[in-house]
Image (tube, helix red, strand yellow):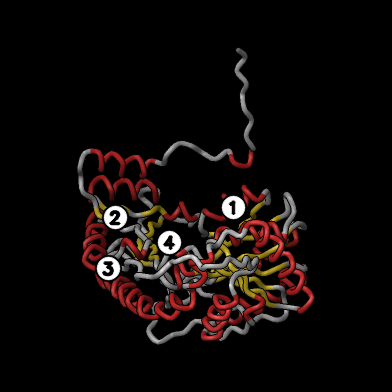
């Protein structure tokens, strides 16, 4: 019998081989060798188990394409606490921010249109863009003691790419911790108006400034340009398994109305978010501040530990103002992947190479959610191993 070779799409032809660090950690596990994992950013694996909640299904099912009004009212109040101004009817829910990004790509871009994303950045965007059939073009974040957007590079990219349909900002950014300044927000709005494109703002780490007593403002208040502000319970409530995310749309009335019309069609097509978890959104948002305060405290302790223990060594922690990650600059005597392998094999410390986030130079990235005793041990081992 003739064997047919089945065809698959080119856009999902992703690499199948594992990277060298994954292979090395797998080998250590097979040998029963212990190592200190300083990369875990899942709160439920770092001391914050999920609260006990009742997920009984409602007796009657009434599908709501944009999500339940009670959940959207609670999210609107949460955004208002950060200075945002979006009514509940301009918010829609989805099962995770990745799904929201796919919806927004479908809503704003046709095949081979372009979204601009920051570099360094999180590699997840690449896969979502491949699935959605659009292209990504990066614009640089620059570091000179603080992180900032390279607006000259961004404007140059806009002039050279006539098919750009959206600018993405991540604020606070992962893994750099960069928070958009008011000046940067105004400059982005000006570019969106000049080139007729949308602004997509990822604010999942908005509740985690590393300076005590600071409340970071939401971008869900922009009325000049069409703006989609994305967040979710994965970070806001430190509950990645809750799978509730939202996009709040603001901007000119006609553009907002059209975006919501399209979001309702997309939502009605898939209806991915279970009614039971939507019902719990107000309660989970009410409980979130306690978990946030505990995470704040751990991240600040770990950042302070890194600053104190690495002072005067060959390892330099970069200045981060928010989020759960800490990049460290290492000497350029090895590549960052070589350093990560060396630290794993010789010091039994697992860190992520900065090149995985498209960071320029020689950096590794640690999770600030690591338990403080383990984090301190990891910092000491890195300093000793590098020296």
Q: Report the label total.
A: 4
For disc 2, the neighbor class at 10 Å (few under 14, some 14 to 19, many from 20) is some
Mark 4 or 2, nearer chain start: 2
Q: Depth check: give the residue in front, 61 or 25.
A: 61
The residue that disc 3 covers is 312
Q: Of callouts 1 and 4, which one flags the residue occurring earlier in the amino acid sequence?
A: 1
Q: Residue at x 58, y 65 (%)?
A: 61
Q: Residue furthest top?
A: 1
Give residue 266's quadrant in the image.
Answer: bottom right
Q: Which residue is mark 4?
A: 241
Q: Are marks 1 and 4 in contact (CB under 8 Å)?
A: no
CA gap between label 1 and label 4 equals: 20 Å
Which sits earlier in the primary sequence, circle 2 or circle 3?
2
> Residue at label 2?
37
Q: Residue 104 at x, y = what percent?
A: 66, 62
**Closer to the observer: label 1 or label 2?**
1
């Amino acid at each position: 019998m003739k064997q047919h070779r089945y065809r698959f799409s080119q856009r999902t032809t992703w690499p199948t081989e594992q990277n060298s660090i994954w292979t090395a950690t797998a080998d250590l596990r097979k040998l029963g060798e212990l190592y200190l994992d300083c990369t875990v950013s899942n709160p439920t694996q770092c001391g914050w188990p999920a609260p006990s909640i009742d997920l009984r299904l409602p007796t009657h099912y009434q599908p709501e394409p944009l999500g339940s009004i009670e959940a959207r009212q609670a999210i609107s109040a949460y955004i208002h606490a950060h200075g945002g101004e979006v009514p509940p009817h301009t918010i829609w829910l989805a099962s995770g921010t990745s799904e929201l990004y796919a919806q927004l790509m479908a809503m704003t871009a046709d095949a081979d249109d372009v979204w601009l994303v920051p570099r360094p950045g999180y590699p997840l965007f690449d896969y979502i863009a491949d699935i959605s059939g659009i292209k990504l073009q990066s614009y640089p974040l620059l570091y000179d003691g603080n992180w900032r957007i390279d607006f000259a590079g961004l404007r140059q990219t806009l002039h050279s790419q006539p098919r750009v349909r959206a600018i993405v900002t991540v604020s606070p950014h992962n893994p750099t911790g960069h928070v958009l300044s008011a000046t940067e927000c105004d400059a982005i709005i000006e570019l969106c108006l000049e080139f007729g494109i949308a602004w997509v703002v990822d604010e999942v780490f908005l509740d985690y400034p590393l300076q005590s007593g600071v409340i970071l403002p939401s971008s869900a208040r922009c009325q000049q340009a069409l703006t989609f502000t994305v967040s979710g319970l994965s970070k806001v409530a430190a509950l990645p398994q809750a799978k509730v995310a939202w996009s709040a749309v603001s901007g000119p009335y006609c553009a907002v109305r059209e975006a919501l019309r399209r979001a309702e069609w997309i939502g009605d097509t898939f209806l991915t978010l279970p009614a039971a978890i939507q019902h719990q959104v107000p309660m989970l948002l009410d409980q979130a501040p306690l978990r946030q305060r505990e995470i704040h405290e751990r991240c600040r302790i770990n950042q302070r530990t890194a600053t104190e223990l690495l002072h005067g060594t060959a390892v330099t922690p970069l200045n981060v103002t928010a989020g759960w990650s800490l990049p460290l600059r290492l000497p350029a005597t090895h590549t960052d992947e070589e350093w990560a392998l060396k630290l794993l094999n010789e010091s039994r410390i697992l860190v992520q190479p900065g090149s995985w986030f498209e960071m320029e130079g020689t950096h590794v990235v640690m999770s600030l959610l690591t338990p403080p005793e383990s984090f301190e041990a990891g910092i000491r081992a890195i300093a000793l191993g590098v020296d």
